[in-house]
Amino acid sequence: MRRGKYPFIIGFLVVPVALYVTFVVAAYVQTFQLAFTDWSGLGPITYVGFDNFVTMWNDSLFWRSIQHNLFVLLVLPILTIALALVFAFLLNVGGGHKGGTTRGVWGSKLYRVIFFFPQLLALAIVAVIFGRVYSPDDSGLINGLLPAGTEPILFLADGNLALISIVAVLIWQSVGFYVVLFSAGMGSISPEIYEAAAIDGANRITLFFRITVPLLWQTIQVAWVYLGIAAFDCFALVNIMSVERGGPDGATSVLSMMIYRNAFEFSQAGYASALGVSLFILTLAFAALTLRVTRRDAVEM
Amino acid sequence: MSEIFARPEVDRRTLLRRAAAVGLLATPAASLLSACVGGGEEKTQDQAEGTKSATNPLGVDAKAPLEVIIFNGGLGSKYATDVHIPSYKKSFPTAEVKFSETQEIGKVVQPRINAGDPPDMVNNAGAGLMDMAAIVKAGQAQDLTDLFAAPSLDIPGKTVKDTLVPGAYEQGLFDGKPFVLNYAFTVYGLWYNKALFTKNNWTLPKTWSEFTTLLGTIKAAGITPFAYPGANAPYYMYLAILTSAAKIGGTELLKALDENADGAWEAEPIKQAAAAWAEIGAKYSDKKFKGLKHTEIQLQQNQDKVAFYPCGSWLENEQAKDTPKGFEYAVIPIPSVTGSDKLPQTAIYAAAGEMYYASSKGKNPRGGMEYLRHMLSKEGAAGFTKLTKVLTVVQGAADGLTISPGLTSGNELLKGAGKDFFGYRWPDLYKKLDVEVQAATNQLMYDGGTADQFVTRIAKAAKAV
């Protein structure tokens, strides 16, 4: 039997690996190659060495975009994970324990559905809906609710508010998924542990910080990496929601938006590839860093 | 004009798909790194050719199939299927014409160019259009010299070039050679609801002080006097600013912008125009419009909540579905800023737009050119105007057509201007500068910016081009 092991494994792997190489690896390699050219997206190409990277270094919009990406990288995971943990805790354990089992707060089954709902909507639809919610005149959901005569809030048209407004939508949309993820994690924590802690006189807050968070640490870590990668993207929301696509005046520009515009609007596929390379390196660095920093011995159960 | 027809709303998946498509096509699987990206190799294709004759001056092969692809946006595609293709088929009944339409022309055509199999006639328009200069540079567009020198299809005694309005031919030149036909002729001005103005007895302004006085009256009536879409089309506004500048100081300054000459943006008339318009933005508009899209503001105008709207003549057709009964589109030239403007008050911005080109590396480049000749026939042009309510570059083709109030008003605007119409090309030539000018325009009009800030900021970006 053992002799047939390798053909068997290879047989399983050939198709996915081939697909992966063609559609992912090849595209990456191509991007790295194109980053050193001035290809417009059409026709012949010439190699220009590091010119694109020099341009990038001197491009103030590039640095602003990185700043915005880093801002999202900080805010999105922290708030999403915090909210998701609190909600998941309330849904699963928050109701205290009775008759030997821990329960969620009253109505938690309904909340679970509600929290998960935004996750079912395509991001593009979410963006369009929130475009209406944020609309700067009376037709906007929020501005329409303000009493007549008050100055409307220019959520997306005000450079100071625009990025925060978009990040808020991103958080709204992602929380549901992580509530479910953390709920699953909490479900696997044995109720005896909670019971024992409760007998020792732990209140809900102590339970949360001393029991739930440590036992969920690995799940949180995974969530952090996922959200971090999402933070490097945010293309769909910025492209659809923002004023002037990445504006006002560059206030919501992110790397992915810059890549798109350079590649498909400004006919600078070479420069766009260079930006893509920088995004690739940033994302990779982030993932490696997160895994290293959050390395902490998992609590044995 | 074309940019506004469809707002790109691309989700990440589409982007990825597109990026993957580009990557894939650019990657002949054989050797990754040594492969030549994007069809750098010359592929010689068998190209159809027939014998030239008086009725077939371009030497089209009567049997060769022709493939046409049309951008389906604000103009629709009915004009192609109902007018131009039947016209072509009438001359070449045995030719098969393959028609397709798309809302994302670049996504469909660019991969086919890179694969060496482009459609014969491409309507390069819409938000997802391809950079025309890049196409020409890559040798993908057919030199149209023969087309313009050929006799017109149904206007006797004239070459195709003779039948065009002044400036239309020049608009398609790249390094002195014509590579693209700009077919639609768009006139720009301030659009308003004639019925509303008649009802209120508002007289149309000719001078700047008449303009501001009227805007004051309109504001007092509880209507926003003026607005433009800051969210996605600030270029409507900078077009108005530069129109004013050209009227103050003459059209040479627009040429300087096209050439990106030193100090072109710091010309005094541009500053004057920016200052005059900044006042309108501060006093007679509202910064909330910075966050609204063209469709939203146009709807507000249809509801008589906005009085004047700077736009091109596609507006009426674009709003056709939403325009309520009794709303009558009309347009006026932008009022003169000073009493000593170089150009008369009737001068307007008017330009050929909406690009059509024949693929030089397709299977039937001659057929592609011939198709353009059919578009430029009087019948073809009139048919286009009837279906789209947009004028074409064929002189006088729309005369005598009564189709809609807006079109009539636009035609009158053009007649009133006589020879005093002008345009520029710099946004197509320097796309990144265009982005900067749009941002600067929003700052000037909606964020209380000054003319000096406006000019300095753009001049700095223009230097970096």
Image: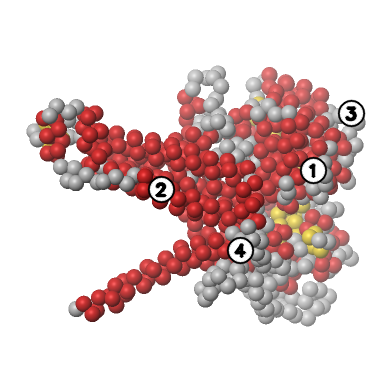
Identified by mark 2, the residue type is: Leu
Which label is found at residue B110? 4
Q: Which chain does the residue under circle 2 lie in?
A: A
Indicate the secondary structure of the residue bearing disc 4: helix
Which label is found at residue B339? 3
Q: Position of residue B63 (x, y in %)?
A: 68, 79
* Proximity of marks 1 and 4: CB atoms separated by less than 8 Å: no
Residues at marks 2 and 3, CA–CA distance in whole angstroms? 66 Å
Q: Which chain does the residue under circle 3 lie in?
A: B
Which label is found at residue A289? 2
What residue is drawn where x is 49% and y is 50%?
A: A282
Q: Which of pointers 4 and 3 indicates the residue nearer the eye?
A: 4
Residues at marks 1 and 4, CA–CA distance in whole angstroms? 32 Å
Q: Where is residue A265 in the image (x, y as percent from the top left)?
A: 63, 53
Visible residue check, residue B140 = yes
Identified by mark 4, the residue type is: Gln
Q: Which of pointers 1 and 4 indicates the residue nearer the eye?
A: 4
* Proximity of marks 1 and 2: CB atoms separated by less than 8 Å: no
Q: Which of pointers 1 and 2 indicates the residue nearer the eye?
A: 2
Q: Residues within 10 Å of mark 3 (few under 14, many from 20)?
A: few
Residue B46 placement, left or right of A20: right
